[in-house]
Image (spheres, grey):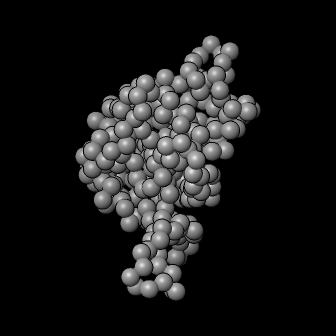
Amino acid sequence: MYLTRFRINIARPGARRLLGSPHFMHGAVNMSFPEVPPRGEDGPRVLWRVDPAAAGRADLFIVSPNRPDLTHLVEQAGWPSAEQPGWTTFDYQELLDRLAVGSTWGFRLTANPVHHIRRPQDSREAPTKRAAHITPRHQIGWLLDRQQRAGFEVLRIPAERRLTEHGSEHEVIVHNRTPTQFGKFEGVAHRSRRQVDFTRVTFDGRLRVTDADVFRRTLTHGLGKAKAYGCGLMTLVPVRAS
């Protein structure tokens, strides 16, 4: 497994085109590999996420089973004349092997928190519809509902450190809540156009590993829906002992 960080030059028209469409970015990420990466449930998949960064750029993170070649992205959305290639790839397996039950980490996750609803006018036999969680409270609740099955637990804030008596109990915040819409052409001749509509949110917080094997799967398979469009990738940073 590999973790790659690519520096995006947001001043370039090609970069703005990619940043404005998760569908285009998904295609550009897939073009980093000689063969289209598999999307099955059995093995690790390609995950990606874009984070804002300083100095007129954004950072694209990619987790993948194979090492990517991002030369085409440098030409389209990077700094082609720079001496450095514009991206750095790390051996992600080293970090995965360090994961142990009880270890604590800072994390960032961009995800698509959804639930299934049935409208009041629908009959009980009508299928439920997928809908986005709108409020930070429900979005955090979505994450907490999945933590046990994903091999981790978000750390709790001691009562004496909470800002209010009924404040958040967990060390996690939600930001960059972004409703996203774009058209996607489908079919053999790409003649039909489907509207894709979802909400991306980013979680920052601290967690403890509860099942190392399951957590490794979460990091390499992703968490939640819309993985092809920049959701599901969780990255970690070590937590320094106080």
Quadrant location of the N terminus in the rendered image: top left
Nearer to me, 130 or 125:
125
Please identify the quarter of the rendering in which residue 91 is found: top left
Nearer to me, 153 or 75:
75
- x 53%, y 66%: residue: 132
Say if residue 120 shows up in the picture.
Answer: yes
Q: Is 208 left or right of 228, judged from the image as shown?
A: left
Q: Position of residue 92 (x, y in %)?
A: 37, 32
- x 38%, y 82%: residue: 125
Nearer to me, 33 or 52:
33
Say if residue 49 shows up in the picture.
Answer: no
> Does residue 80 lie above or below 117 as drawn?
above
- x 45%, y 55%: residue: 225
Please identify the quarter of the rendering in which residue 152 is found: bottom left
Q: Position of residue 12 (x, y in %)?
A: 73, 30
> Does residue 83 lie above or below 113 as drawn?
above
Q: Position of residue 229 (x, y in %)?
A: 52, 47
> Does residue 96 lie above or below 165 as drawn?
above
Q: Is 81 left or right of 43, judged from the image as shown?
A: right
Q: Position of residue 79 (x, y in %)?
A: 67, 22
Total number of numbered labels? Answer: 0
- x 56%, y 59%: residue: 198
Please identify the quarter of the rendering in which residue 135 is found: bottom right
In this view, which residue lies farthest toward the top?
Answer: 83
> Does residue 132 lie above or below 78 as drawn?
below
